[in-house]
Image (cartoon, rainbow, N blue to C red):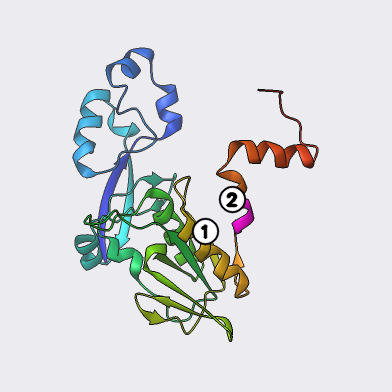
Amino acid sequence: MFHTQIFYLTKKKANEMSAENMQAAPSTTTEHVESHEEMAQVQGELALPVDEKKFIEMNVPKAHFEKYQFKPQVISENKIEFYNAQDVSYYQRELKNPVLTVWLLTHGPAEGKPAKMNYTQKRLFETAWKMNIQVKIVETPRFDLVVSQEGLQHILYNGVKVEKLPDAVLPRLGAKINYFSMAVVRQFEKMGVLVLNPQDSLEISRDKLYTLQTRMCHNFFFPSFT
């Protein structure tokens, strides 16, 4: 195992600092620092005494540290909660015997741009991994939907028939969700897969007026507007 130390400033200590120091380094007085490069910067600007410096060990295989380029972002008092790997292949790993398989539906990168993952996708993967839950990040444009007289049992991903469906699907499509993405969500629902945030809720939430009309029908209070 590879051992490294990461310096960070706790939120409690930041709140205890004087107004002078807070003004001197407003951009670095945060709950943590993201990399070793920031360590010297924070230590210098805040002029912390030796007994106020906080260190935490990061125990990971050296090959993982170098290959996946970890940049921890969420650090508690005694452990790192989020490795924040810069290499996306870290989030494409597969568990041998997961207790549950969840597909995270995304739009994927724009055409011609490299794959990139956001904070939420990374956190969901890392947290689920610790619980022996396999999270697979899939892109809706890569699906092909097959509807025939035999039913809706066919769905292709990257041109290959999906033999084993996930236990659950979690759409993370945002406000830019399009017609085909909605169709993918609807297909999973019709095939009996548990969909967290089903198609109906996505359709309502993307239309503000529709959202208010739905709330009104269920007696949810909201201020009047024109």
Q: For the stretch drawn in magenta, what is the main secondary structure?
A: helix
Task: Using the rendered view, name the quadrant where residue 189 is placed.
Answer: bottom right
* Frontmost residue, 59 versus 109: 109
Q: Which residue is mark 2?
A: 203
Q: Report helix, strand or loop for mark 1.
A: helix
Horizontal and vertical percent position of residue 179? 48, 56
Count of number-bearing discs: 2
Is residue 88 in the magenta section?
A: no
* Frontmost residue, 201 versus 121: 201
Report the side of 57 relative to 143 (left or right). Answer: left
* Frontmost residue, 60 versus 116: 116
Up/down of 154 relative to 49, above or below:
below
The region drawn magenta spans 198-202
Residue at position x 21%, y 56% in the image: 112
Q: Report helix, strand or loop for mark 2.
A: helix
Q: CA distance from mark 2 to mark 1?
A: 8 Å
Up/down of 47 relative to 121, above or below:
above
Horizontal and vertical percent position of residue 220? 76, 36
Residue at position x 48%, y 54% in the image: 172
Of mark 2 and mark 1, the one earlier in the sequence is: 1
Horizontal and vertical percent position of residue 57? 32, 53
Q: Quadrant of the N terminus?
A: bottom left
CB-based contact (under 8 Å), mark 2 and mark 1? yes
**Circle 2: residue type:** Glu
**Mark 1: few/some/many CA within 10 Å (<14, 14-19, 20+):** some
Task: Using the rendered view, name the quadrant where residue 215 is placed.
Answer: top right
Q: Which residue is mark 1?
A: 182
**Mark 2: few/some/many CA within 10 Å (<14, 14-19, 20+):** some
Report the side of 74 relative to 194 (left or right). Answer: left
Residue at position x 27%, y 17% in the image: 24
